[in-house]
Amino acid sequence: MKEIPQTSVTSVLEIMDVETGERQIVKEFPYLIEAPNWTVDGKWLVYNSKGKLYKISPHKVGSPLLIPTGFAGNCNNDHVLSRDGKQIAISHGTKEDGKSRIYTLPMEGGTPRLITPMAPSYLHGWSPDGTQLAYCAERNKNYDIYVIPAVGGEEVRLTHAEGLDDGPEYSPCGKYIWFNSVRSGLMQIWRMQADGSEQTQMTFDEERNAWFPHISPDGEKVVFLTYYKGDLEPGQHLANKNVELRLMPASGGESRLLLKLFGGQGTLNVNSWSPDSKKIAFVSYRLN
């Protein structure tokens, strides 16, 4: 994960209605914040900043509230909420070697429980039944998709293609894992069965690199982030770039543009759909 100076940007936390295009600024921050999650009750947006996790109301905006994460004070933008809303899983760079490992803890905060002793491991998905976590991990000098029991245990490798496979996220039905892969040249969106079979390319954009597919709670729509071809290497997802948010049917087909913005890393790393599948939360940036 590329380090961004915390005070070099203004972060704008926004909400957008994907059907009407209406946008609402929740709050501007004179420092870096990243990766909003919408809680399952719709009351809070959870984000990371300066290694900590916070929540803020998207409806009656006040001061952000800290979610205590104990010793895990180096959280990155890979955090996921369980479907029942009772737990949060985080990726935290441990003080021993600085590498990201995955932990779980109660949603209200608490002492993190280590799930992936091996590193680096970057969390992206939690199965709807609460039993599995899906993540991107570097093992033997290659980044692939792995799953592991949510209580810890033996990890299982699901992808074996050369190059980067990243961003795995379960569909609400639990049947599929969506992810992004460079195996076709540019970074594109893919989908596979939850056991790793039937790996199928879902986007075929020759002008954009597609990242971080997020499936709406009703299972019908997928929002994702794109970088323009040539702005960066296909395997990079950098900050401070002109990017797009795009929407496609979960059944497949052409995507459509939602909006263009200045962002990238931190804008849409985690699932930020509202519980009613009508809105998304995201972060755009301005350089200070």
Image: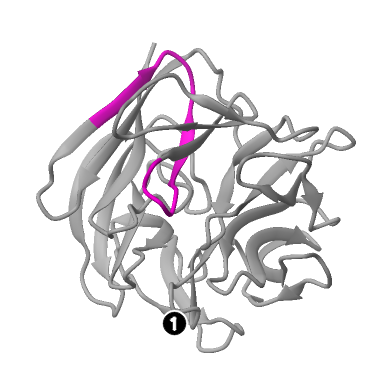
Q: Which residue is mark 1?
A: 200
- Relative image position of residue 113 (x, y in whole percent): 80, 50
Q: Position of residue 114 (x, y in %)?
A: 81, 52
Q: Which residues are magenta?
A: 25-43
Q: Is residue 27 magenta?
A: yes
173 in magenta: no
| Residue located 44% across and 79% down the image | 173
Q: Quadrant of the N terminus?
A: top right
Q: Residue at x 20, y 70 (%)?
A: 254
The image quarter containing residue 186 is bottom left
Asked if one can make out residue 268 in the rendered structure from this viewpoint, the answer is: yes
Task: Reply above or below: 88 against 95.
Answer: below
Q: Quadrant of residue 243?
A: top left
Q: How many marks?
A: 1
Return the residue found at the far bottom: 198
Across and down, in percent, residue 157 comes to 72, 75
**Which sits in the foreground, 148 or 145?**
148
Residue lying farthest to the left in this orientation? 20
Q: Amino acid at mark 1?
A: Thr
Is 63 above or below relative to 144?
A: above
